[in-house]
């Protein structure tokens, strides 16, 4: 039996070793994301968002993450959430006593809480996406989208192949920058010439990208891509784990929204 | 598990008066082609650029022409086993020259399975085919979930071949598969191809510049011709030795690399032998232009101010060397050892990870604007180009304007200088007829000549070249070599990163071998070896 | 011209899909590269958040550029959706909602190209498409529940939408049109209908 499974799915053994979320089908993880996001999006309040963030941090081990690893991946998101919370606090219309005001910035008690809620909500929505992406292989996601969600396979796999090249393009950006400096671009050192230099560098990257994409398209077509119906070497399947994942998402969403409504902290966006 | 053989039913290729013109072009890519490939035959296809070799391979692979190309024009017939290639998808597999774009997916197993999946092979059969294909190309030791980005160039090409073999094609097409590889990779891929194709019995059609690599492994050589008015069909066909005998001269004149023939460089100084010896007569003092002191190099250091440069792990360290006027230095070594990184650091484009690169007063006093710092990476672009010129491996990375003429004028304009040299360079590098053309539309050899010319337009005293002869045909090779010899005679210092031993020899360059078995080695031709020119104490 | 030929013309080939996807990836890389150098952005945004609308146009380049190059129905939406997926995979502060933003921004541009029946790809069309993309972006961020600006006061929202519209028109619209023209002249677009974009009149 294992022999047969090995023939059909060579990654089965590796997958069995992974933590729970790693074993789940990408589609169910996606569904969990949708559930949590939809639940949290209607209110800006620190309670529902705070509970959600707490739950999300608790399930980190299920994705093979810990706080340090999470920080490495997600610190720009935290910074963005803080910035967003700050802006919300100073730019929201004030409905109560004003704590401080400075030019166009005004912050009242109400808007301070709103800002805090916004910060936490930002985290509560961004974190699950990071967690899911940390335990999902892009190829498996593409398989799930094409096989189970029935998205057109040419678009899904074509996109997957293109996304693989992002690292190469970052490197190429730097190479082009050096190559252009070696030609004397950006000679004057002032802002305008720096801008022009960057525009030229961007153009160079676009040319190389299109060339590279054309070659990749030939490679894929030469291997029969898009010529007709295809089979799948890595069957994407749903299992009991996926039911647990969806249930977990419902629980988290339910807890966050339910407690918030019960306590009266829930604050409809409109 | 039942034993699994790779044997396929080999394909027969027939072309009768076949021609193709791409949409939007006025000249045909291929014309009047009559060709027969017997099942199981191994054929090497030669010919100058413009003869339509790639077009033929693309046509056989079934990727030529699509609904949009309603402008395209096909004449004659091209058949695989009596069917049109477009209807016989999967009968032919194609491997091209750029390793990066031959890889489709992120894991080794997935990439090899891709072709089989596309051909609707039953899932139960796919993985055994994948394993067999990987074995056949010598990559059977890799776990199936090994990331593809972590493979070397030669391994990527072999992976592409495995992906093709998993489709069990009757016809294997190779379009310059070793053009972008180092010498070790070239042999690696050649051996894998021969082994795998022999095991499967498929028909093989290879297009390559490097004849000696394939000469003894193929049954037949076919030469396509191209004249001034376009491609002209098959010029010769027969056993390799016979064809090279009869066509050798003509082919060499068109730039094909003939085994045993290294092009003679024109412009070698009278009295100096072209393939040996170090330039001994110099028009100026053999002064030091650039010095590296205890230099460590790393890729992460691109910022001019050196911010963040020190954090990365250096790929090479403890380098001490001098670059002198009128001398040539070749940096060689296996891929990944840090040759390009070293060259870019010396050229002032990367900040050193540790140690220093310092320009001598001779170098600093060239031109009007004297830089404030002696270290090249702190120089403004204007100060840099008049002292150090760098030619990158991919010419397109260095194109900054919309026409060949503007490219040549760019450097002098940035310096506020006159453009006298521009016409001279145009002529010297045979680019006059292309003066108005967009640089990106030039052929490979023309782009290479243009990128060298544009750097020379600013009169740098030190020239750094990254793989200047990579993938070049014999003619461009000779022209480049001759040009560099002239520059050396004028007192320019030349630093090349190269795998090309013939090139190193032809320039009379001292060789700096990085990462050898006994650590780094310095060796030179003639008496300059070890004359305090360079030493590398160790590597990271 | 037979109907089958026309149908094939509208259909997406493999090269269309892969190039469109890679334009989207390039757009993402460029956005990252430009924000590396623009270290004054964060203090600006902290000072008055709606100012971020002035560079939001950069985010919509894939939509307009993709449509100008590929010239097939759905190009704007597809490119922007791929760019958004790339963002999601890299880790976005907007979480899953970045996909919705991407789809809406792409839709804005797509509607303009559709209004011209996918026959006009000149400068005014590009600018309009960029502006529409910017408008949808501004509206998304200001009025939809997950919008980053949902809680701001009216003036801030209005200014943000205005800035998005302008930067969309200029950066996503005009710049993309210029880029397409330049790309066509390099010969990189020889496989597409836009191969002649190098010589097309700006207002024709």
Image: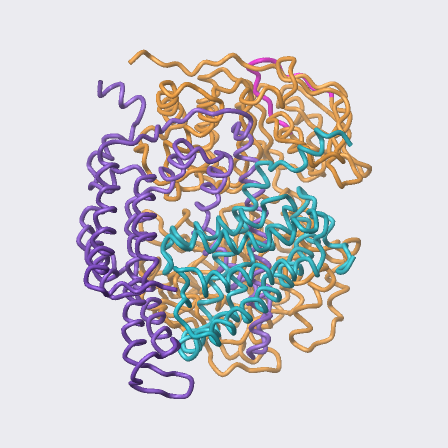
Q: Nearer the viewer, residue B284 or B99?
A: B99
Residue drawn 41% across the image and 35% down it: A149
Q: Nearer the viewer, residue B428 or A193?
A: A193
Query: Residue A54 is drawn in which quadrant?
Result: bottom left
* Color theme of the render: by chain
Q: Quadrant of the N terminus of chain A?
A: top left
Is A173 rendered above or below residue B33?
below
Q: Is residue B358 visible?
A: no
Q: How many marks?
A: 0
Q: Position of residue A223 (x, y in %)?
A: 52, 29
Q: Colour of chain C?
A: cyan
Residue drawn 72% across the image and 62% down it: B425
Residue drawn 77% across the image and 54% down it: C199
Our reading of the magenta stretch's main secondary structure is: strand
* Residues shaded magenta: B34-45
Q: Quadrant of the C terminus of chain A?
A: bottom left
Q: Nearer the viewer, residue B203 or C124?
A: C124
Is B262 rendered above or below residue B75?
below
Q: Position of residue B412 (x, y in %)?
A: 68, 72
Is C203 rendered above or below residue B95?
below
Chain coloured purple in this rendering: A
Left or right of C63? Residue B128 is: left
Query: Residue B419 is drawn in which quadrant?
Result: bottom right
Left or right of B34? Residue B107 is: left
Q: Is residue B534 visible?
A: yes
Q: Nearer the viewer, residue B365 or B11?
A: B11
Q: Colour of chain B?
A: orange
């Amino acid at each position: 039996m294992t022999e047969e499974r090995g023939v059909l799915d060579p990654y089965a053994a590796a997958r069995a070793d992974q933590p729970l979320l790693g074993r789940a089908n990408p589609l169910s993880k996606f569904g969990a994301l949708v559930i949590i996001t939809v639940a949290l999006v209607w209110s800006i309040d620190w309670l529902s968002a705070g509970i959600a963030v707490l739950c999300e941090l608790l399930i980190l081990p299920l994705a093979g993450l810990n706080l340090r690893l999470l920080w490495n991946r997600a610190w720009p998101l935290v910074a963005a959430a803080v910035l967003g919370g700050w802006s919300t606090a100073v730019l929201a219309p004030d409905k109560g006593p004003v704590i401080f005001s400075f030019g166009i910035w005004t912050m009242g008690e109400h808007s301070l809480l709103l800002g805090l809620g916004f910060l936490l909500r930002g985290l509560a929505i961004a974190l699950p996406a990071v967690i899911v992406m940390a335990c999902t292989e892009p190829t498996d996601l593409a398989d799930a989208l094409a096989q189970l969600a029935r998205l057109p396979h040419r678009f899904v796999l074509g996109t997957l192949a293109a996304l693989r090249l992002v690292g190469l393009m970052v490197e190429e950006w730097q190479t082009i920058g050096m190559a252009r400096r070696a030609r004397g671009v950006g000679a004057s050192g002032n802002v305008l010439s720096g801008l022009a230099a960057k525009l030229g560098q961007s153009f160079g990257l676009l040319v190389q990208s299109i060339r590279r994409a054309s070659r990749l398209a030939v490679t894929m077509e030469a291997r029969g891509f898009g010529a007709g119906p295809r089979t799948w070497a890595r069957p994407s399947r749903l299992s009991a784990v996926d039911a647990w994942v969806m249930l977990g998402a419902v629980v988290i969403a339910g807890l966050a929204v339910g407690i918030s409504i019960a306590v009266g902290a829930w604050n409809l966006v409109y | 598990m039942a034993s699994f053989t790779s044997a396929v039913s080999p394909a027969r290729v027939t072309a009768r008066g076949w021609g193709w013109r791409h949409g939007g072009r006025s000249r045909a890519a291929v014309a009047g082609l009559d060709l027969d490939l017997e099942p199981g035959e191994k054929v090497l296809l030669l010919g100058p650029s413009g003869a339509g070799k790639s077009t033929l391979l693309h046509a056989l692979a079934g990727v030529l022409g699509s609904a949009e190309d309603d402008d395209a024009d096909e004449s004659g017939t091209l058949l695989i086993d009596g069917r049109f290639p477009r209807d016989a998808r999967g009968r032919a597999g194609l491997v091209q020259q750029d390793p990066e774009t031959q890889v489709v997916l992120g894991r080794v197993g997935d990439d090899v399975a891709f072709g089989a999946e596309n051909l609707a092979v039953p899932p139960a059969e796919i993985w055994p085919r994948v394993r067999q294909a990987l074995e056949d190309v010598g990559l059977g030791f890799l776990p199936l979930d090994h990331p593809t980005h972590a493979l070397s160039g030669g391994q990527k090409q072999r992976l592409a071949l495995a992906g093709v073999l998993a489709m069990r094609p009757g016809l294997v097409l190779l379009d310059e598969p070793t053009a972008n590889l180092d010498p070790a990779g070239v042999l690696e891929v050649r051996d894998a191809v021969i082994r795998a194709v022999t095991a499967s019995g498929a028909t093989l059609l290879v297009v390559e510049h490097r004849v000696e690599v394939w000469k003894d492994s193929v049954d037949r050589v076919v030469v396509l011709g191209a004249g001034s008015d376009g491609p002209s069909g098959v010029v010769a066909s027969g056993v390799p030795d016979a064809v090279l005998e009869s066509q050798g001269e003509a082919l060499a004149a068109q730039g094909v690399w003939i085994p045993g023939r290294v092009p003679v460089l024109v412009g070698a100084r009278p009295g100096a032998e072209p393939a040996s010896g170090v330039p001994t007569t110099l028009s100026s003092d053999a002064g030091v232009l650039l010095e590296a002191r205890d230099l460590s190099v790393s890729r992460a250091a691109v910022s001019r101010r050196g911010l963040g440069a020190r954090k990365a792990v250096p790929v090479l360290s403890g380098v001490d060397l001098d670059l002198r006027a009128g001398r040539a230095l070749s940096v060689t070594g296996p891929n990944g050892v840090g040759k390009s990184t070293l060259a870019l650091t010396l050229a002032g484009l990367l900040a050193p990870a540790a140690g220093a690169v310092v320009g001598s007063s001779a170098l600093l006093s060239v031109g009007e604007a004297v830089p404030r710092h002696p270290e090249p990476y702190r120089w403004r672009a204007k100060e840099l180009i008049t002292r150090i010129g760098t030619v990158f491996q991919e010419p397109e990375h260095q194109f900054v304007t919309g026409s060949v003429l503007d490219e040549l004028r760019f450097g002098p304009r940035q310096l506020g200088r006159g453009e006298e040299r521009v016409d001279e360079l145009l002529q010297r590098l045979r680019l006059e007829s292309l003066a108005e053309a967009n640089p990106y539309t030039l052929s490979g050899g023309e782009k290479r000549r243009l990128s060298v010319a544009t750097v020379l337009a600013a009169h740098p005293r030190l020239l750094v070249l990254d793989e200047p002869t990579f993938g070049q045909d014999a003619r461009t090779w000779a022209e480049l070599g001759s040009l560099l010899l002239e520059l050396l005679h004028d007192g320019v210092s030349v630093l090349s990163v190269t795998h090309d031993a013939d090139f190193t020899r032809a320039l009379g360059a001292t060789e700096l071998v990085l990462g050898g078995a006994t650590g780094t080695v310095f060796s030179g031709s003639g008496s300059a070896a070890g004359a305090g020119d360079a030493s590398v104490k160790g590597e990271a | 011209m037979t109907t089958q030929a026309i149908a094939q013309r509208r259909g997406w080939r493999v090269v269309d899909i892969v190039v469109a996807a890679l334009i989207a990836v390039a757009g993402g890389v460029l956005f990252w590269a430009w924000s590396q150098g623009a270290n004054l952005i964060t203090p600006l945004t902290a000072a008055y958040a709606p100012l971020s609308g002035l560079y939001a146009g950069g985010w919509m380049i894939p939509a307009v550029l993709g449509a100008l190059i590929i010239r097939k129905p759905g190009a704007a939406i597809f490119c922007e959706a791929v760019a958004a997926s790339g963002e999601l995979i890299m880790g976005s502060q907007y979480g899953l909602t970045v996909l919705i933003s991407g789809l809406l921004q792409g839709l804005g541009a797509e509607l303009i190209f559709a209004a011209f029946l996918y026959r006009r790809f000149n400068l005014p069309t590009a600018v309009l498409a960029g502006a529409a993309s910017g408008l949808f972006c501004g509206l998304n961020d200001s009025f939809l529940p997950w919008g980053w600006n949902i809680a701001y006061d009216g003036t801030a929202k209005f200014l943000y939408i205005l800035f998005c519209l302008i930067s969309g028109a200029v950066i996503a619209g005009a710049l993309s049109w210029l880029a397409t023209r330049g790309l066509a002249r390099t010969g990189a677009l020889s496989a597409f209908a836009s191969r002649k974009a190098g010589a097309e009149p700006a207002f024709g």
